[in-house]
Image (spheres, helix red, strand yellow):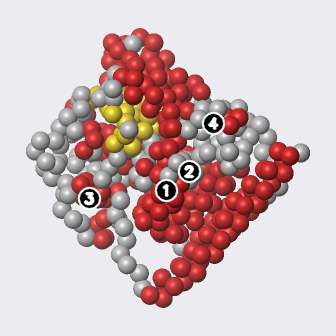
């Protein structure tokens, strides 16, 4: 099993904010001059050597860092008096389509033997940890970070609607189909490092913690950051990519497109997406590692996250002086007018229809390809 953040409990850790405050980022993104490796190398080298000399290669490459509690700053006054942040936070940067990353996760967890293992997943994506590692047995629609699946598929749909709304669900469907297509050339199953984290955590008795912000909230905030013109262009560009007949060549692990790279590409065309898709999630994962109820009084915590998030997460860990709060990272905007609600409903239903049609077309094309 795994630990998940309960909004009603975490919101109780501080005063309820106003709507405007709830949507204000608690920390700025890392400045261009910040480098997580140089900021943490001295703290990591000695500890890694003491835990397992074989970890030295991961440390020197920047894949593994340690941030001790003395770098965090004081526990904020609004946290309960019996709360204690972890003594040590280790962070391992991984590739979601790499067997090597899965081996590295096992090596680090068995060497460090943490109390908690925080993974870059949320509740509706937790099924990735229990999926098969056999790429040949994957469904026609390849698993990815946006997938809706698992044994509780309809529960995941309901949660997506409740947390992010139908518009966010529609965007998630489009991104799932689009990601499946652009990664169709990769011959590795998605998320092997998360399955390794689950298996080893069970072996060593560590608690698994879902450390990423719910994808439904992330996509809702992403949509709200775009103008109507940008939303239309985004949907059209995703739809064109999905329906394109261009064949995706076979890719090795290093060439496969990661979710972080997809987010970066989207943010280059739509700069306002950078904050909700990357920076806010970096802060949320830092909060999960050091300040969530799940890691209270832990001695050691290990985070398993995508390599692209390392700089932002480490910066948030050491720059935070009590600013990282759950309520600031999951805040919802105020209610809208009746007229805008009607317009949004029409657009939403159109996008959902397009997403489902694109999914059907992709599965049909894949089925024909298999028959041939």
Sequence-first tag of 2 and 4? 2
Q: Which residue is mark 1?
A: 156
Q: Earlier in the sequence, mark 4 or mark 3?
A: 3
Q: Find the distance from the CA under tag 3 to the CA under tag 1.
A: 19 Å
Front label number (2 vs 3) = 2
Observer-side mark, 2 or 4, equals: 2
Q: What residue sits right under mark 3 in the picture?
A: 8
- Asked whether the beta carbons under mark 1 and mark 2 sit within 8 Å of each other, the answer is yes
First reached walking from the N terminus: tag 4 or tag 1: 1
Which residue is most to the front? 151
Q: Earlier in the sequence, mark 3 or mark 1?
A: 3
Residue 163 image offset from top left, x and y in percent: 42, 63
Q: Residue furthest right?
A: 372
Q: How many C-alpha atoms fall within 10 Å of the one at disc 1: few (<14), some, or many (≥20)?
A: some
Circle nearer the viewer, 4 or 1: 1
Mark 2 or mark 3: name the one nearer the start of the chain: 3
Circle 2 packing at 10 Å, graded few (<14), some (14-19), many (20+), is: some
Q: CA gap, disc 4 to disc 1? A: 21 Å
| Residue named by callout 4 | 189
Q: Are marks 4 and 1 in contact (CB under 8 Å)?
A: no
The residue tagged 2 is: 149
Give the x, y percent position of residue 77: 13, 50
Q: Residue at x 63, y 36 (%)?
A: 189
- Residue at image coords 54%, 47%: 150
Image-quadrant location for residue 314: top left
**Farthest residue, direction bottom:** 339
């Amino acid at each position: 099993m795994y630990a998940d953040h309960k909004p009603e409990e975490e919101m109780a850790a501080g005063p309820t904010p106003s709507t405007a405050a709830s949507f204000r980022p608690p920390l700025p993104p890392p400045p261009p001059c910040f480098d997580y490796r140089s900021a943490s190398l001295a703290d990591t080298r000695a500890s890694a050597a003491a835990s397992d000399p074989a970890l030295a290669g991961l440390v020197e490459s920047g894949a593994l860092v340690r941030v001790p509690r003395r770098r965090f700053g004081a526990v904020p006054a609004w946290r309960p008096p019996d709360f204690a942040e972890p003594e040590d936070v280790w962070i391992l940067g991984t590739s979601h389509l790499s067997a090597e990353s899965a081996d590295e996760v096992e090596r680090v967890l068995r060497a460090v033997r943490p109390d908690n293992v925080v993974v870059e997943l949320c509740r509706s994506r937790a099924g990735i940890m229990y999926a098969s590692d056999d790429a040949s047995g994957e469904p026609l629609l390849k698993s990815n970070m946006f997938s809706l699946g698992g044994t509780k598929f309809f529960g995941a749909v309901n949660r997506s609607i409740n947390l992010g709304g139908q518009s966010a669900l529609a965007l998630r469907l489009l991104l799932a189909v689009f990601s499946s297509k652009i990664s169709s050339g990769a011959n590795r199953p998605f998320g092997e490092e998360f399955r390794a984290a689950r298996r080893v955590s069970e072996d060593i008795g560590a608690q698994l913690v879902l450390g990423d912000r719910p994808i439904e909230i992330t996509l809702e905030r992403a949509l709200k950051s775009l103008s109507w013109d940008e939303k239309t262009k985004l949907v059209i560009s995703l739809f064109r990519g999905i329906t394109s007949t261009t064949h995706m060549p076979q890719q090795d692990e290093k060439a496969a497109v990661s979710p972080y790279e997809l987010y970066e590409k989207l943010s280059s065309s739509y700069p306002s997406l950078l904050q909700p898709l990357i920076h806010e999630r970096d802060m949320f994962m830092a909060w999960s590692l050091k300040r969530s109820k799940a890691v209270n009084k832990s001695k050691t915590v290990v985070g398993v996250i995508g390599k692209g998030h390392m700089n932002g997460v480490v910066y948030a860990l050491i720059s935070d002086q009590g600013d990282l709060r759950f309520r600031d990272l999951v805040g919802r905007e105020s209610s809208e007018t009746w007229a805008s609600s009607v317009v949004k409903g029409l657009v939403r239903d159109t996008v959902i229809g397009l997403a489902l049609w694109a999914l059907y077309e992709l599965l049909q094309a894949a089925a024909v390809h298999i028959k041939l």
